[in-house]
Image (cartoon, rainbow, N blue to C red):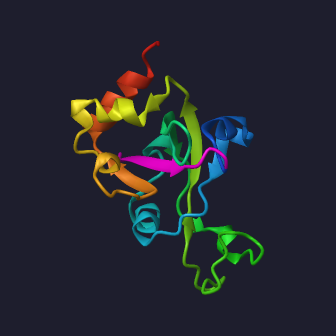
Amino acid sequence: MRYWLMKSEPDEVSFDDVLAAPGQTVAWFGVRNYQARNFMRDAMQIGDGILFYHSSCAVPGVAGIAEVASGPYPDATQFDSAGKYFDPKATQAQPRWISVDVQAKEKGRYLTLAEMRAMPVLEDMVLLQKGSRLSISPVTSGQWNAILEFVRTKD
């Protein structure tokens, strides 16, 4: 089993949106970075753990725990010529971008980016590295366990 941090802008899809979705599951769409795409296409497996991270918001942080709920498949938004994720180079025969389904598992205490930076066990986390802008990044089992322990504590 692997662990991932996946960033979503809460104005686009928040963790609460996932909780309210049928089966508490949504397609992870709109990834337009090749390294992040390759993680979804080549490395993610059904059942892998996900730290659902709210980014580009007033208080970024881990909003919930989820898991990968499907194998990779073509991201439909790349074919929508009216959408903001349209890619004119993508075709049905040769899609360029990938989605996976993400299922919410647990909403615990919100873990802010500032709190993450203060946790020594997370100092090597990809998210916290200078210049890191990946929308999907791997998380070690030690980082995963430390974050789970935090989000499961009461305020």
Asked whether 129 or 98 is in front, the reply is 129
Residue 146 magenta-drawn? Answer: no
Q: Residue furthest front?
A: 58
* Left or right: where 97 falls relative to 113: right
Magenta extent: 1-11
Residue 10 magenta-drawn? Answer: yes
* Left or right: where 142 falls relative to 62: left
* Left or right: where 143 falls relative to 24: left
Picture residue at 49% right of the left edge, 27% below the top: 110
Q: Is residue 23 above or below residue 70?
A: above
Q: Is residue 69 above or below residue 15?
A: below
Picture residue at 49% right of the left edge, 23% below the top: 109
* Left or right: where 44 falls relative to 86: left
Residue 114 in percent (x, y) is at 38, 33
Residue 143 in percent (x, y) is at 29, 37
Among the 4 quarters of the image, the one containing residue 31: bottom right
Residue 27 in percent (x, y) is at 63, 55
Q: Is residue 93 above or below residue 50?
A: below
Asked whether 62 or 69 is in front, the reply is 62
Q: Please state the total of marks drawn on the protein image.
A: 0
Asked whether 117 or 135 is in front, the reply is 117
Residue 133 in percent (x, y) is at 40, 58
Asked whether 106 or 123 is in front, the reply is 123
Picture residue at 61% right of the left edge, 60% below the top: 29
Q: Is residue 9 above or below residue 23?
A: below
Picture residue at 41% right of the left edge, 62% below the top: 39
Query: The N terminus is located in which quarter?
Result: top left
